[in-house]
Amino acid sequence: TDEVYGGDSLADQPESASMEPTNPYACTKAAAELICKGYMRSFNLPIMISRGNNVYGPHQFPDKLIPKTVCLINANSPAFIHGDGSHTRNFLYVQDAATAFATILHTGSTGEIYNIGSPNMKTNLEVVRDIIRL
């Protein structure tokens, strides 16, 4: 996940960037990567790491921004936004993420890290407004 970089997006981060997680949750993701690297080096396991973010799509549990907003709008309830809605995110549709994982699995190299994302940055408020317009 992009959270290991410590910023809002992996858009400007090369895979070689140092991990600088800013909260305990992101630290657990960075730690998991380090554990995988340890197993790769100690036991020669064929590890490839992917760092994606904010995947959305059908049947997603409704605790995330997009499915929660869709559920609220469908129930004729007001949409909910944390803070002022200015937090910026990069969203990736589940099929695009699956295609990226398949590409990494079939053509990637052991020991490499792959960022998965898109250049489409949106604020939470923009995302909710886009959903309302649908």
Image (spheres, helix red, strand yellow):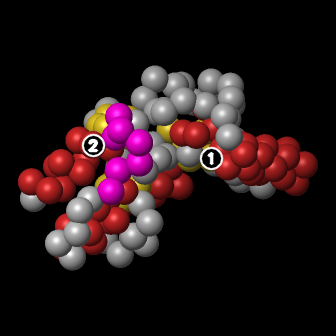
Residue 66: image location, x then y, percent: 32, 59
| Viewer can see residue 107 | no
At label 1, which amino acid type do we have? Ile
Name the element at disc 1.
strand
Residue displayed at 22% across by 69% down: 77
Q: What stretch is highlighted in magenta?
A: 80-86
Residue 26: image location, x then y, percent: 66, 44
At label 2, which amino acid type do we have? Leu
* Quadrant position of the N terminus in the picture: top right
| Left or right: 83 in relation to 108 | left
Characterize the local packing of mark 1: few (<14), some (14-19) or many (20 or more) Cα atoms within 10 angstroms.
many
Residue 105 circle label? none
Which residue is label 2 attached to? 125
Q: First in sequence, mark 2 or 1: give its number.
A: 1
Q: Which residue lies furthest to the left in this view?
A: 133
Residue displayed at 40% across by 36% down: 87
| Left or right: 87 in relation to 105 | left
Front in this rendered view, residue 35 or 105? 35
Residue 123: image location, x then y, percent: 31, 37
Q: Is residue 28 above or below residue 78?
A: above
* Quadrant position of the C terminus in the picture: bottom left
Q: Is residue 46 above or below residue 60?
A: above
Q: Do the residues labelled 2 and 1 touch (CB within 8 Å)?
A: no
Residue displayed at 54% across by 39% down: 2
Residue 49 circle label? 1
In the image, is residue 36 part of the stretch drawn in magenta?
no
Residue displayed at 16% across by 49% down: 130
Characterize the local packing of mark 2: few (<14), some (14-19) or many (20 or more) Cα atoms within 10 angstroms.
some
